[in-house]
Image (cartoon, rainbow, N blue to C red):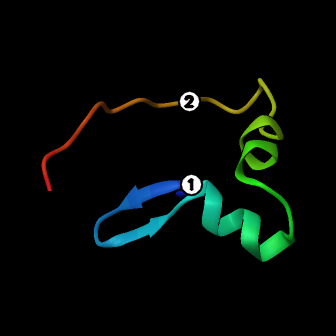
Amino acid sequence: MTILGKDGYDKITATEMAEWIGTISYEVVCGISKRVPRVYLGPTEE
């Protein structure tokens, strides 16, 4: 499941999610607990 980021042609940004819940992107990103694994795939060419 992709919560934030890009999956194929679909993309959800922290800014977009923040707009949905009426806050700022910084709060969305900081609200993700340390228990959630992060996977950094690096830059991709589009």
x, y (%) of residue 2? 53, 57
Quadrant occupied by the C terminus: bottom left
Q: Residues within 10 Å of mark 2 (few under 14, many from 20)?
A: few
Quickly name the residue at label 2. 38
Q: Is residue 34 above or below residue 16?
A: above
Residue at 25% from the left image edge and 36% from the top image edge: 43
Q: Secondary structure at mark 1?
A: loop
* Residue 33 relative to residue 7: left or right: right
Residue at 47% from the left image edge and 54% from the top image edge: 5
The reply to whether callout 1 and callout 2 are in contact (CB within 8 Å) is no
Of residues 23 and 41, which is closer to you in this image? 23
Of residues 41 and 17, which is closer to you in this image? 17
Q: Estimate the spatial distance between the alpha carbons at disc 1 and disc 2, rounded to whole Å.
A: 11 Å
The amino acid type found where label 1 is placed reads Leu
Q: Please identify the residue farthest to the left as the structure is shown.
A: 45
Q: Which mark is residue 4?
A: 1
The amino acid type found where label 2 is placed reads Arg
Front label number (1 vs 2): 1
* Residue 43 relative to residue 3: left or right: left
Q: Which mark is residue 39?
A: none
Q: Could you tell which of marks 1 and 2 lies nearer the N-terminus?
A: 1
Q: Please identify the residue farthest to the front as the structure is shown.
A: 24
x, y (%) of residue 11? 43, 66
Q: Is residue 37 above or below residue 28?
A: above
Question: Toward which corner of the image does residue 30 lie, by quadrant?
Answer: top right
* Residue 26 relative to residue 10: left or right: right
Residue at 76% from the left image edge and 75% from the top image edge: 20
